[in-house]
Amino acid sequence: MNQFSTFPFIRFTIFLGIGITLYYYFPVLDHQLILPLWSSSIFIYVFLFNFRKHLKNPVLLGLAGSIFLISSGYFLMYLNTDTNNPQHYAHKAEKLKYYEVIVDNLVEEKEKSWKTVGRIRSAVVDNEILPLTGKVLLYFDNESPKNFRTKES
């Protein structure tokens, strides 16, 4: 008897984890490859599920479901990766002149610097202001402080 047949959540989790791991090691930069794989795996699974009584080999349904879960994990990782957003600043990094950063968390004081994380809100690219997203790690020298422009000043 199959050891995993009584634990379907473990099977689903394993195949989703495989899809997430595949994205981590083999990232695809174009969504035009991921979306057709994911939608065709849904179509194949639904087709086989509707005709499961006529199948001579029920392993095909399990294989189609596994491919669907693997492609779902891969697709979810693609959607949740910030650099895949078309408005991410990494796509315009070579043309970036200035960017507006919002610092909304605490500043950590180091021995010779201050460290904080800022969210990019917009940037100047080719003399026009574009709305961009992303996070940057900011370091400021605390031994020779300079006058920074803030909203308060």
Image (tube, grey):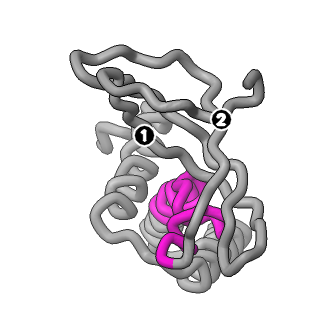
Identified by mark 2, the residue type is: Arg
Query: What's the amino acid at mark 1?
Result: Leu
Name the one closer to the observer, 117 or 28.
Answer: 117
Residue 30 in percent (x, y) is at 53, 81
Q: Position of residue 117 (x, y in %)?
A: 49, 33
Which mark is nearer the camera, 1 or 2? Answer: 2
Label 1, residues with CA under 10 Å away: few <14, some 14-19, many ≥20: few
Q: Residue at x 48, y 38 (%)?
A: 8
93, 64: nearer the viewer: 93
> In the structure shown, which secondary structural element does the residue marked by tag 2 occupy?
loop
Looking at this view, is 118 or 12 the one in front? Answer: 118
Q: Residue at x 51, y 66 (%)?
A: 90
Q: Mark 2 — residue?
A: 149
Please give left or right for residue 13 compared with residue 34 in the image.
left
| Residue 21 shows in the view | yes
Counting from the top left corner in percent of width and height, residue 105 is at 57, 21
- 134 shown above or below 25: above
Residue 73: image x %, image y %? 50, 55
Q: Quadrant of the C terminus?
A: top right
Does label 1 or label 2 sit earlier along the sequence?
1
Is the magenta region chiefly helix, strand or loop?
A: helix
Looking at the rendering, which quadrant does residue 102 occupy? top right
User: In the picture shown, does residue 124 fall above or below 109?
Assistant: below
From which residue to which does the magenta span run?
69-94
Q: Residue at x 64, y 25 (%)?
A: 104
Disc 1 target residue: 137
Q: Is residue 51 visible?
A: no
